[in-house]
Image: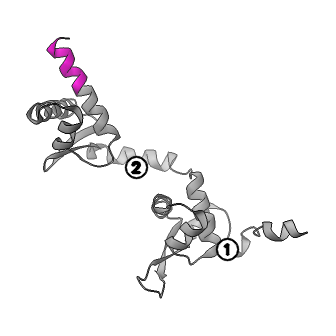
Amino acid sequence: MNLFTQREQIKGVLESLLFVAEKPLSIKFLHTMLNIPETYLKEVINELAEEYRARNSGIMIIKMEDSYQMLTNPQYAEWIKIFKQHTNNKLSEQALETLAIIAYKQPITKAEIEKIRGVNSDYAIKTLIEKKLIKIVGKKEVPGRPFLYGTTKEFLKTFGISSLNELPAVFDFNNANAA
């Protein structure tokens, strides 16, 4: 394999890793993972970043200390905002489940939600807050004073109801089995 092909493949691997990484990737991590000299990695990443800059790409690679991250180009932020407004109205099953728990049990803490769901709810809560369907409504008067979550006016608007009293009744499976 010639050097050009190898360099292009390494560039493709680095581009893929930077694209899927949720956090900046350090040169040390990439060196350990790929077993490629750090100076060569920096050179290839900088070359890739320059290619994006030169063509005014919608994505860019930025350096933070000794780490690199791929981000959208802020020059196109308005287009991203428009795109998100048109595509960001679907909720995952986990977010819907979390939202239902909050709607029926509010005010409720994250720990209480997680006890009901049996799984971590950080991402679902973050998503619901970003979509303005829930908000922090206070802090519970217990040690640690965890946040209490409740629904918002946007929640009511999104689901076409004027108050929480219009939510459908919760079916009691325990009592249904006894009948």
Mark 1 sits on what residue?
164
**Three-letter residue code for mark 2:** Lys
Residue at the extreme bottom of the image, as rendered: 141
- Picture disc at residue 81: 2
Q: Quadrant of residue 35?
A: top left
Image: magenta residue range:
2-10
Mark 1 packing: few (<14 Cα in 10 Å), some, or many (20+)?
A: few
Q: Which residue is rendered at x = 22% and y = 29% of the image?
A: 55
Mark 1 secondary-structure assignment: helix
**Three-letter residue code for mark 1:** Leu
Residue at the extreme left of the image, as rendered: 39
In the rendered image, residue 106, in percent from the top left (x then y), is placed at: 59, 76
> Is residue 176 at all visible to an observer of this figure?
yes
Q: Does residue 43 lie above or below 76 as drawn? A: above
Q: Nearer the viewer, residue 153 or 69?
A: 69
Residue 42 included in the magenta stretch of the image: no
